[in-house]
Amino acid sequence: MKAFVTGATGFLGGHLARALSDLGAELRLLVRPASDLRNLEGLSAESVVGDLREPQGLEQAMAGCEVVFHVAADYRLWVRDPDQMYRSNVEGTRAILAAAEKNRVRRVVYTSSVATMGFTSNGHPCDENSPVSLDHMIGPYKRSKFMAEQLAIQAGRSHLDVVVVNPTTPVGERDIKPTPTGRIIVDFLKKKFPAYLDTGLNLVDVKECALGHIAALEKGRSGERYILGGENLTLKQILDRLARMTGLPSPKVRVPYGVALAAGVVDELVTGRILRREPRATIDAVRMGRKKMFVSTAKAERELGWKPISVEDALRRAVEWFWRNGYA
């Protein structure tokens, strides 16, 4: 099998590329000119230079590939120019799907996000059928991923074989950027987590999530989406686990929502607008935190053979990797 993979220099995409390589797949990886290539070290793969925002060369880059894994995305909770995010996430997905159709690939696996789901305010786990619309999406990241997911679903239900996977919050080693979730761990290790917000996430082992993509390739139904999740945990539970692993103190003070929102406003203004750096606290992140992002993986369990497991080992691997590589 010859697989075309976008986003392989990133966290989840890098683990997927390694999982495919371990299964004997021949890989062709789309790499941006300025990409950090550390996640490709030791990987046997062909690389082609390109950019989702410049789709002219995608059709040729994909030529001869049997399947496509479109993992690449602009994943930030704050951005100075939202148009760039829409170009990458929405128009980039449109271009990948068009190139896949022209190359008559057997199947596309599109990596969406749990952010597109219809979360509830009472913390009850949502699933793929929970009511949701674009109006529920907070900020350009969630809106752009929702719009891109709709393109993939529509293609999968009409003219192209496309399966959508919705990873929750992957954790583990090789989070080189790091992702917003990785920054939570790094901030904890650097003792920059004096308080917490009453919110919740579903964490998933990044290695298991990569294997879930391959299961979607083999077993998923075109035009359907599948949540790939692990454990539903409050932020306090995550911090307490990190405390037990590291011996560092877990914060005991819970920040009221209004205070957290005010802090986000100030951080975006000072750090983002004045200092022109990415803020640690963002308005969109605080607004998202009003709902616990808990999910059910029953559909993936039933149709893909997915088995949600504890993220204890993944958190430990993440901590050790960040320490070993000088992040904290």
Image (spheres, helix red, strand yellow):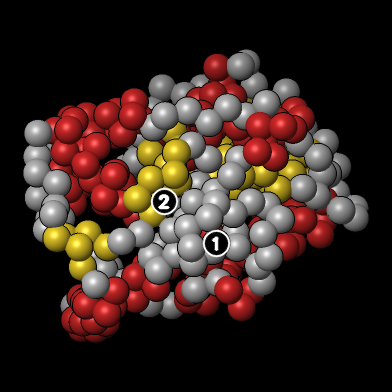
Residue 323, can we see it? Answer: no
Density class for disc 2 (Cα within 10 Å; few <14, some 14-19, many ≥20) is many
Q: Secondary structure at mark 2?
A: strand
Is residue 207 shown left or right of residue 4?
left
* Residue at image mark 2: 201
Q: Position of residue 66 (x, y in %)?
A: 77, 32
- In depth, the one of 44 and 116 nearer the eye is 116
Is residue 194 shown left or right of residue 158?
left
* Residue at image mark 1: 119
What label does residue 169 carry, if any?
none
Cβ–Cβ below 8 Å for labels 1 and 2?
Answer: no
Q: Residue at x 62, y 35 (%)?
A: 213
Quarter placement of the N terminus: top right
Q: Give residue 211's quadrant in the image.
A: top right
Q: Residue at x 71, y 48 (%)?
A: 225
Density class for disc 1 (Cα within 10 Å; few <14, some 14-19, many ≥20) is many
Amino acid type of the residue tagged 1 in the rendering:
Phe
Amino acid type of the residue tagged 2 in the rendering:
Leu
Q: Give residue 143's quadrant in the image.
A: bottom right
Is residue 267 shown left or right of residue 21?
left
From what the image shows, is residue 297 above or below residue 181? Answer: above
Q: Position of residue 221 (x, y in %)?
A: 81, 40
Residue 212, can we see it? Answer: yes
Q: Secondary structure at mark 1?
A: loop
Q: Residue at x 9, y 39 (%)?
A: 248
Q: Give residue 267's quadrant in the image.
A: bottom left
Q: Position of residue 79 (x, y in %)?
A: 39, 72
Quarter placement of the C terminus: top left
- In depth, the one of 258 and 71 nearer the eye is 258
Q: CA distance from mark 1 to mark 2?
A: 11 Å
Q: Position of residue 275 (x, y in %)?
A: 18, 78
In primary-sequence order, the first of circles 1 and 2 is 1
